[in-house]
Image: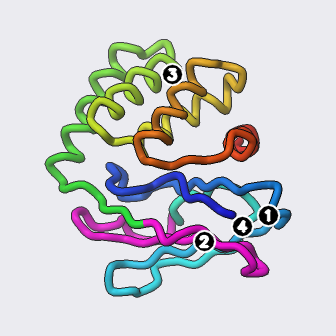
Amino acid sequence: EISSISPRNTTISKRPDFYWAVDRNLVQEQEFIISLSDSNGKEIFREEIASFEFRFPENLPDLLPEKIYTWIVTTSDEEFASEETYFKVLPEDRIDEFTSMYRNLRKKYIASENTLFISYGTYLIEQKMYSDAFVYFNEIQKKTPDSRYIHQMLAITHLKQKLFLPYNQEITILSKLK
């Protein structure tokens, strides 16, 4: 089984990073295909990768605010697939609000990127932007993999999205992201 993690529902980013997890008891494949389509079914990209995360391609234009997009991940042998996951990019005025908050926090926590990411991630949870909060807490987790607090915050982002992963599946994905 493949579980999509982020983005889900709504996102701040017009160029989101994509994250997913696999159940290692079922999926042995290490190669994946990720595809993103617009609400009309037009494919925006389709890429083969050997990772559990994917950065939005630099050669493509930004996604449009207030438009719905769908993404799916399959194993390269197409034996397993995630569910189709929908998300929408926030309207420009809301993106500006979040960008302004991030800039203010960055000025305040200039000496500590971890503190900045924790503060902003917590703010995103308060604003019910769980998918985006996951991205920030996941970045900290890569640097401090043994932090119980960060694992708790990642669990909150999963629970709030009603994304339930078996414990061992979650540990596999979070420890593999680099």
Q: Nearer the viewer, mark 1 or mark 2?
A: 1
The magenta span reads: 58-85
Query: Callout 3: helix, strand or loop?
Result: helix
Say whether marks 4 and 1 touch (CB < 8 Å).
no
Q: Which residue is mark 4?
A: 49
The amino acid at mark 2 is: Ile
36 left or right, relative to 53 = left
Label 4 or label 2, whichever comes before in sequence order = 2
Label 3 or label 4, whichever comes before in sequence order = 4
Q: Which residue is mark 3?
A: 113
Q: Which residue is mark 1?
A: 27
Of 27 and 39, nearer the camera is: 27
Label 4 or label 1, whichever comes before in sequence order = 1
Q: Which residue is mark 2?
A: 34
The amino acid at mark 1 is: Val
User: Is 72 included in the stretch rendered in magenta?
Assistant: yes
Of 99 and 140, nearer the camera is: 140
Q: Residue at left 39%, top 21%?
A: 119
Residue 115: % across, % down: 47, 16
89 left or right, relative to 133 = left
178 left or right, relative to 108 = right
Q: Nearer the viewer, mark 3 or mark 4?
A: 4
Residue farthest to the left, as pictured: 93
